[in-house]
Amino acid sequence: MQVTFPHMGYIYVGIAAMAKWLNVGVVVPPPTSQRTLSLGVKYSPEMVCLPFKLSLGNMIEALESGADTIIMPGGLYGCRFGYYHKAQEAILRELGYDFEMVSQELGIMHMVKRITRGTPLREVITGLRFGLTKMNVLHELEQMVHKKRAVERDRGEVSRIHRDGTKAIENAADHQELKRVRQEYLQTLKNLPTVSPPIPLKIGITGEFFIAIDPFANMDMDVELGRLGAEVCRPLSVGEWIRFTPVPIILGLREKDRSHKAAMPYLSRNVFGDGWQSVGEKVLHARDWDGLVHVEPFGCLPETMARNIMPSIKDGLPVLNLIFDEHTAKAGVINRLEAFVDMLRKKKRRQVKVCV
Amino acid sequence: MEAYLGIDVGSVTTKLAMLDKNDELVASLYLLTEGKPIEMVQQGLKQIKQQLPEDVDICGVATTGSARYLAGVIVGADLVKNEITSHSVATLQYLPEAQTIIEIGGQDSKIIIIRDGVVIDFGMNTVCAAGTGSFLDHQALRLNMSIEEFSRRALASDTTVRIAGRCTVFAESDMIHKQQMGHRTEDILYGLCQALVRNYLNNVGLGKDIKSPVVFQGGVAFNQAIVKAIQEELNIQIIVPPHHEIMGAIGAALLVHEELLNNNNGSKFKGFGVSEVKYHTSSFQCKACPNLCEIAQLSLNGQVLARWGGRCDLWERSPSS
């Protein structure tokens, strides 16, 4: 059996680690590229959202490289995404591929059993734990990267360390090595020569999960914001998503639960996808962020609702809305980000002056 | 004479503005880009030189607009700035108490909200170009009239004709339908203006607190029918400033003047001579990874000056290699 799965940010690191631990054959799809997108667009219904097109492209490229089992989350997301695995399965069968589509619709454990085939449960759990630990380390590294990129002295240095660090985490064979890699890269970042920007800025990214975290889909938005000297805060991350620590869940301390609570006066129910959280993040971070970039794929219903509710939250946190599709005009995105950062900086400079 | 030059290379038009050391406008130009940004910048430099006295000394140059990086390399800009900042700076110079700027250009439309002289919020069209100058141009062309005639005739409308403004495709089929039903051209044209304004306010202006004084600028502000439609929709008096079409260029010039007051290391301006040089642009597909980025490059006498368009910095890092 050769298992594969679509890309979503760096989630491949965690999944590949689990598979290797459990001796399951895994095919990591080639990195998402223009070719992936072209394949996805060619075989997708025209009006579906970008995550559908990109994941379909990943699946085709993985099947080409010898995969025979595809894992695709389905059902629980609540928006159209929940049905994507079914539609994609039909499309791929029509294209003549022979494979098995596995989803967690019948429960996560059911899915895990189907893939691990008879491996004792205890073994499975240690494997999952290893994968999750990798995702958490990646998350830690990323947060440090976001902090440092805004103040780096040698342009591009932080991105280089991020790339190398991700590779090293990917290659770590056990918990011990992972620990060492974590130490090493966090330390390297900490010791990096920095410059202090005239006005430090914190910009949050929220919106649809896939677009927010996938660097291909959002055109390396966090790198661009970092280059402009802004620290990126992105509560959405795979690490955050799959964190199973029971205490924060019971106490409602997870970012997701806190944001839902904060959204209540403006949106009091789930609109599926990440719409509820998007609204909540704006309320929650009105004080500690200087601006908010809200991202969504074209045609996303939950985020369309969130986008239209946001202006009614009059807390003075400026929002820049960006809609992504298969177009490649990165200039338009950079232009808006640059103008946004410029505005926030001028605004903050004045506030600082008033305080003094 | 000390002078500061601002160049705004937009999708449809190229604007140049020259300010003296008191920030007074001494010369300006408004040209159609015609899809040839490099030639237009060169031609603009040549033409603006003729408007200037012999002893002019260019102390600083700034570029803005969608081709600002390209233009910046060609002229040797001291500052490259986005349009939002440029427009707001120019407007505030003209009207310090302005609270809202409506700017509609060839491909972009924006709204800028200002309070106490500082931009606090802005909106820009995202996936839709309905309601921008290009669409109006296209419709005028389809009806075989100049954009000036479009504006004049739309103002002569006396009956409301409702046109869908959500999407240019719907708008166009609505217009054709109304036209085949026998409605007057004047009424259809004004109906289109109203539709575009509605679309603009519902999309770009969504949730924005539009407060008077409202300044309307950009090429579309030439169109009196659109001005009238905005005023009717908002029920607010709209101010169209003089030189509204070159505000971006003026703002860029103001910004570079301010920048050089703070740290003046001399201008990087390459001189008016660049209008005589033959630049060469080309593009190629990078094959280093499956992304197949389209890299564009600008070269002079076989030497590469700049490269753009990669997802990584492989080509941008070392343009000379």
Image: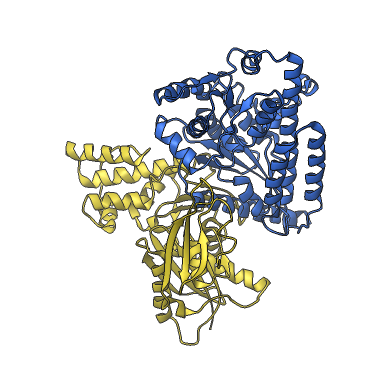
Chain colours: A blue, B yellow
Can residue B216 be seen in this snapshot? Answer: no
**x, y percent for residue B157:** 26, 47
Q: Which residue lies furthest to the bottom in this view?
A: B55
**x, y percent for residue A347:** 66, 53
Name the residue: 50% across, 55% down.
Answer: B309
Nearest the viewer among B124 and B206 is B124
User: Would residue A61 be found to the left or right of residue B224 on screen?
Assistant: right
Q: In the displayed structure, would residue B50 be above or below residue A170?
A: below
Nearest the viewer among A22 and B295 is A22
Quadrant of residue A288 within the rendered picture: top right
Q: How many marks?
A: 0
Quadrant of residue A152 within the rendered picture: bottom right
Q: In the displayed structure, would residue B220 be above or below residue B279?
A: above
Image quarter in which the N terminus of chain A is found? top right
Nearest the viewer among B95 and A69 is A69
Can residue A98 be seen in this snapshot? Answer: yes
Q: In the displayed structure, would residue A321 be above or below residue A201?
A: above
Q: In the displayed structure, would residue B110 be above or below residue B78?
A: above
**x, y percent for residue A327:** 45, 44
User: Would residue B23 be found to the left or right of residue A258 on screen?
Assistant: left
**x, y percent for residue A173:** 75, 33
User: Would residue B199 be found to the left or right of residue A352 on screen?
Assistant: left
Name the residue: 60% across, 21% down.
Answer: A269
Image quarter in which the C terminus of chain A is found? bottom right
Name the residue: 45% across, 57% down.
Answer: B284
